[in-house]
Amino acid sequence: MSLCLFAKLILPDQTFQDVIERIYRQYEEQKIHQWTHTIPNAMIATVGLLYGEDDYERSVCLTVQSAFDTDCNGGTIGSIVGMMSGINAIPDNWLQPLHVTLETNISGMGKIDIDALVLCQVRNYKITG
């Protein structure tokens, strides 16, 4: 059975840094469009999850420090680990600056209470899901 490129990058007994360096040898962040390309970013996000060991802060930080599309990758991993582990797994130093509000650029929305937004999403899911 042949392994995909990504599976070949993650070999047993490799450190996080080893895997990231192998991704960088395959893709060049400085080349146009490679930093936003789906494949290296999916690799970095997956590595952040694997080596983050279900720890919210560690997973997000490892993912973002790997570079490429940092805001999208960090947001994706934060969302995944947050959903997997729940809000109590997110350290207070990550939550405090938000003051339980989300400031959005969506026309007419402005600041939104995060708890109200979650309840709205749950209601919409029940209606459509």
Image (cartoon, rainbow, N blue to C red):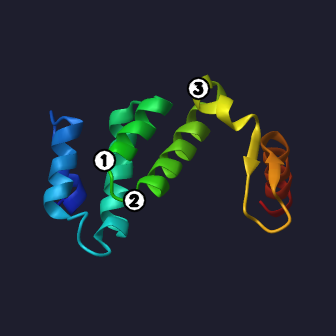
Q: Which residue is mark 1?
A: 66
Residue 101 relative to residue 70: left or right: right
Residue kind at label 2, given as amino acid type: Asp
Helix, strand or loop at label 1? It is: loop
Query: Mark 1, residues whose alpha carbon is within 10 Å: few (<14), some, or many (≥20)?
Result: many
Query: Mark 2, residues whose alpha carbon is within 10 Å: few (<14), some, or many (≥20)?
Result: many
Q: Which residue is mark 3?
A: 93
How far separated are the C-alphas under marks 1 and 2? 9 Å
How far separated are the C-alphas under marks 1 and 3? 22 Å
Q: Position of residue 64 (x, y in %)?
A: 39, 46
The label number, if any, that marks residue 69 in the structure image = 2
Q: Are marks 1 and 3 in contact (CB under 8 Å)?
A: no
Q: Position of residue 101 (x, y in %)?
A: 77, 42
Residue 123 relative to residue 22: left or right: right
Q: Earlier in the sequence, mark 2 or mark 3?
A: 2
Residue kind at label 1, given as amino acid type: Ser
Helix, strand or loop at label 2? It is: loop
Residue 26 relative to residue 40: left or right: left
Q: Is residue 128 above or below residue 23?
A: below
